Image (cartoon, rainbow, N blue to C red):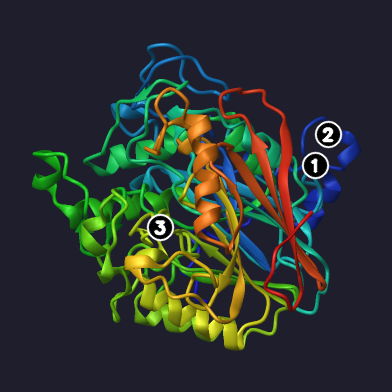
Amino acid sequence: MSFPDRNVSRRSFLTGLSVVGAAAVFPVAAQATPVLRQAPDSGAGLIRNPEFGNGIMAGVPRTDGATLWTRIGAPGGGGSLGSASAGGSLGPGSLGSGALGSAGAAGGELAVIVSTREDLSAPVLAERVQVREDADGTVHFDATGLAPGETYYYQFRGDGGESPVGRFRTLRPADSNEPVRIGWFTCQGFEEGYYAAHRHLAEEDLDFVVCLGDYVYEFTMPGVRGFDLNAFPQGLDSMRDKYRRYRSDADLRLMHSRHAFLPIWDDHEFRNNYSKDGWTFPVISPIDGAIGFQQKKQWAWQAWFEHMPVPRFADDPLRTYRSLRVGRTVELFAPDTRQYRDRQACGDSLDHIVCADADAPGRTMLGAPQKRWLLDGMTGSDATWKVVANANMMMGMVVADNGTRAYMDTWDGYGAERAEILSTAAQSVENMVLVTGDDHDGWAGELWDTGFAPGTSSGEQVNAPGTARAGVEFVVPSVTSTNTGDGGYTVGGSSGDPVGAARAEEINRRDHNPHIKHADMVSHGYGLLDVDAGEARFSFRTVDKLNPNADVVTSKSFRTPAGQAVLESD
């Protein structure tokens, strides 16, 4: 993996005084606040009285470090109007300043401290970092030279202001056989619920957290936090404002301050169900048509890279797919299932229809180079578990006796490529686990080489049953975004009782898809994956999105023994 040059000026903070010497001069016992207060903060040129209202993050962990992120600016942004909410969001009838401008973005320099101690004594890194005014006041600092499998603490500082202290864990050393624990979330429409799930995710003991896409939404349904005035943003700053707005939530900022973070994107960071060639849903005329797909896509990607703690590949600046090796226990693959995909089959109809084109040879979701990267990576990996962070459901989802599939935007609309991947996995990849986002409902199932288990309803769609097991898949429910039980989708008998209709639909889906072992179309929350040499265990953690102080419960958990692509319920 290639990393660009750091945006750091490597100057010393104290002339003639080493970092170790500075720590000795200012011992822990003598300080009421973290040490080195008089060292890095005293140099000329630091930004005066900076605000860190968007929080801090450590992203894409490595054995030797991570990308540290912050933004200079006031909390939150604009674009939402409505009721009061928890976690530092706007009050009734409030419109944040970010809707009207850059929300305080500034240039200049900050100090950054990295230490093995929470009080930041004995720092291992103490440097200056440039704040990029042309990138919405954001900072990306490539912290390197750290030890594998260790917990580090970090802080950004200006002249008269400092960020919260963050924490992250570097990836375990290459020869580690230790268990690995990963947190997962997806689909967190800001207006549709509170982020109590993130408060609980912050308290979990994790190696890192993965977002499976839809971190922000171009538009969300009105909810307990009002409604979105910044709908379908048409410019770069209004796209940036989405991230400022979401990061106004204290629970989300807390989670980011506690764990290293790996984000992948899906579609709502830009536009629902887009492909490499455009979007299938109607444009919001006349503005969408006037600006055009390519220009809007460029701005959406720019805003994402600015506001996510990810390094960019020097030879391919828009590439996001990557892998992380966590000792001998896990190799995690994070593909991009959106920007290389062909247009969805059969017009991407939301009505459940039979669509023969869904299985047409040559149709791709990954694109040829990325598909080769994924297959070569999984077949060549000697990690015990091959874990895929997957934005769109891989296993088939039949909804009727005639074999109708649920949605063409999932792998059900790219059946030939799915069969190629799963057939390769069935033959050459042991212990493959997919963890998936996007659907808003929660699922667990077994993956067969065609996507369908023996006995799956076929009918007119010709859902060919598989003959070999390939792996298992867990689909994480949304944090807040409307699911079936919220009444967000039309199912039989939904009028007046969306929860009852959702429970009935769960039975329908299990009846038509014998590979599905768990269906929950009502709950919200996040997921936990625990893996060791003997098994992988996945827990669905349920949190009420309508209660900012909600507790968390484990609603269901499954285990997969090593060497067996089966799900066993705990």
Q: Is residue 163 among what the camera can see?
A: no
Q: Are the residues tagged 2 and 1 within 8 Å (C-beta)?
A: yes
Image location of residue 224, percent across then percent down: 47, 21
476 or 353: nearer the eye? 353
Label 2 element class:
loop
Image location of residue 439, percent across then percent down: 46, 49
Q: Is label 3 or label 2 in front?
A: 3
Circle 2: residue type: Gln
Q: Is residue 175 above or below residue 167?
A: below
Q: Is residue 424 left or right of residue 165?
A: left
Residue identifier under label 2: 31
393 or 499: nearer the eye? 499
Residue identifier under label 3: 401
Instruction: Check the picture and name the quadrant holding the C terminus.
Output: bottom right
Circle 1: residue type: Asp
Circle 3: residue type: Asp
Determine crowd level at label 2: few under 14, some 14-19, many 20+ residues with C-alpha closer than 10 A.
few
Q: Earlier in the sequence, mark 2 or mark 1?
A: 2
Residue identifier under label 1: 119
Q: Residue at x 18, y 54 (%)?
A: 293
Label 1 element class:
loop
Q: Is residue 510 above or below residue 360?
A: above
Q: Earlier in the sequence, mark 3 or mark 2?
A: 2
Determine crowd level at label 1: few under 14, some 14-19, many 20+ residues with C-alpha closer than 10 A.
some
Quadrant for residue 16, please give it.
bottom right
Image location of residue 567, percent across then percent down: 70, 64
